[in-house]
């Protein structure tokens, strides 16, 4: 019987020996599966149906992952801190948050200091800081698959966990641009949320790929977006320096929520509630059509404070300075109940009966 051999260095080895050696190397590198997983089947008849429970309907579900994303400096952290502050007192931003008691929140921030930024912001928002905790990272940095996350949820009975930003909690060896790594990590975090019915919110920066859909502008692999059940976009409103819009761009569990907005000023955070704007308008830096109508109504109300009537051409000129079209101005006039009146040979708009509602 002839045995085929392979010469390696000064040593002759049979093909069988080479194959065996290669297998050992592959096993050591984790390329070959060392153990076979036993097949287990579950009949759908054995599954007990459950309704989705919401922390904030239809934006943040319990037991699932939610992503809040936007450009740096657009108010994402301020937004989530004010949510945490409200929940710590047993309050909600609006009727979508129905609470019977204060909730415990875990808030992890890798970008802002606890003493000079996070704590002062929480205090300014009126938070009950006894109900908001932070995992100490002074000895070891935290990652999305760190066992301390589960220990912290168990110990505090937290109903909301916030990781801000997501990029800081990937772990040193994880490449967020590789789909398999991103999906494995987020699936483990999603399992943690489901196990303890804790809402987990990941705050993420967006990349600078102008013109791309919001799903593809999140940092890293699209798999982060895929695993999350709800994704919210926070961004600036063109023409409104202090207003930020909150637009839901993904919802796998319910119908899309109505866009919301909040205002940032020297007096702090002000929740505005429903707001007429689209994700495309936020991403594209386009002044929302409905917002232009509100801008036109504000102009007429302001003029009504000091004038009973103004010549039409003067009003059109003022509107043009604010990039408000004549058609939009006419619609605002109609909604506010403004009437036109001819005085001598000129037309005026009567502003003394402008509706303020």
Image (cartoon, grey):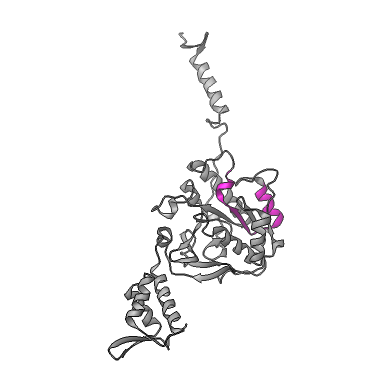
The image position of residue 213, as x and y in percent, is 40, 54
Question: Is residue 167 a member of the stretch shown in magenta?
Answer: yes
Q: Is residue 41 above or below residue 72?
A: above
Residue 277 is at least partly visible in this image: yes
The image position of residue 247, as x and y in percent, is 47, 63
Q: How many marks?
A: 0
The residue closer to the viewer here, 262 or 195, is 262
* Residue under the point 55% across and 44% down: 40
The image position of residue 47, as x and y in percent, is 55, 55
The image position of residue 272, as x and y in percent, is 52, 71
Residue 96 is at least partly visible in this image: no
* Residue under the point 33% across and 82% down: 312
The residue closer to the viewer here, 80 or 302, is 302
**Displayed quadrant of residue 119:** bottom right
Residue pushed farthest left?
Answer: 345
* Residue under the point 42% across and 77% down: 299
* Residue under the point 58% across and 69% down: 93
Asked if residue 144 lies left or right of residue 348, the reply is right
Q: What's the magenta region? A: 148-170
The residue closer to the viewer here, 55 or 70, is 70
Question: Is residue 340 a member of the stretch shown in magenta?
Answer: no
Q: Is residue 185 above or below residue 61?
A: above
The residue closer to the viewer here, 355 or 180, is 355
């Amino acid at each position: 019987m002839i045995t085929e051999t392979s010469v390696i260095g000064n040593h002759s080895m049979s093909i069988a020996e080479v194959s065996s050696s290669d297998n050992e190397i592959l096993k050591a590198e984790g390329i070959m599966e060392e153990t076979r997983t036993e097949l287990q089947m579950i009949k759908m008849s054995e599954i007990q149906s459950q309704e989705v429970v919401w922390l904030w309907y239809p934006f943040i579900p319990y037991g699932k992952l939610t992503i809040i994303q936007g450009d740096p400096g657009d108010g994402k952290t301020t937004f989530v801190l004010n949510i945490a502050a409200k929940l710590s007192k047993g309050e909600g931003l609006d009727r979508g948050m129905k609470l019977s008691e204060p909730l415990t929140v875990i808030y992890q921030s890798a970008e802002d200091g606890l003493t000079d930024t996070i704590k002062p912001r929480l205090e300014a928002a009126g938070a009950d800081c006894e109900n908001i905790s932070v995992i100490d990272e002074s000895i070891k940095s935290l990652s999305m698959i760190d066992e301390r996350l589960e220990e912290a949820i168990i110990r505090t009975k937290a109903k909301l966990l916030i990781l801000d930003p997501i990029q800081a909690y990937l772990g040193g060896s994880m490449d967020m641009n590789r789909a398999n790594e991103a999906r494995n990590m987020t699936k483990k975090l999603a399992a943690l949320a489901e196990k303890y019915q804790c809402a987990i919110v990941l705050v993420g920066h967006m990349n600078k790929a102008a013109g791309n859909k919001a799903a593809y502008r999140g940092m890293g692999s699209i798999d982060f977006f895929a695993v999350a059940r709800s994704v919210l976009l926070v961004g600036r409103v063109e023409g409104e320096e202090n207003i930020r819009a909150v637009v839901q761009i993904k919802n796998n569990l319910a119908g899309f929520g109505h866009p919301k907005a909040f205002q940032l000023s020297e007096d702090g955070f002000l929740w505005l509630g429903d707001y007429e704007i689209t994700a495309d308008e936020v991403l594209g830096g386009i002044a929302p059509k409905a917002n232009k109508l509100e801008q036109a109504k504000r102009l007429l109300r302001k003029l009504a404070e000091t004038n009973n009537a103004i010549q039409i051409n003067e009003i059109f000129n003022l509107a043009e300075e604010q990039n408000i079209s004549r058609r939009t101005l006419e619609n605002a006039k109609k909604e506010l109940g403004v009437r036109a009146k001819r005085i001598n040979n000129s037309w005026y708009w009567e502003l003394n009966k402008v509706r303020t509602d």
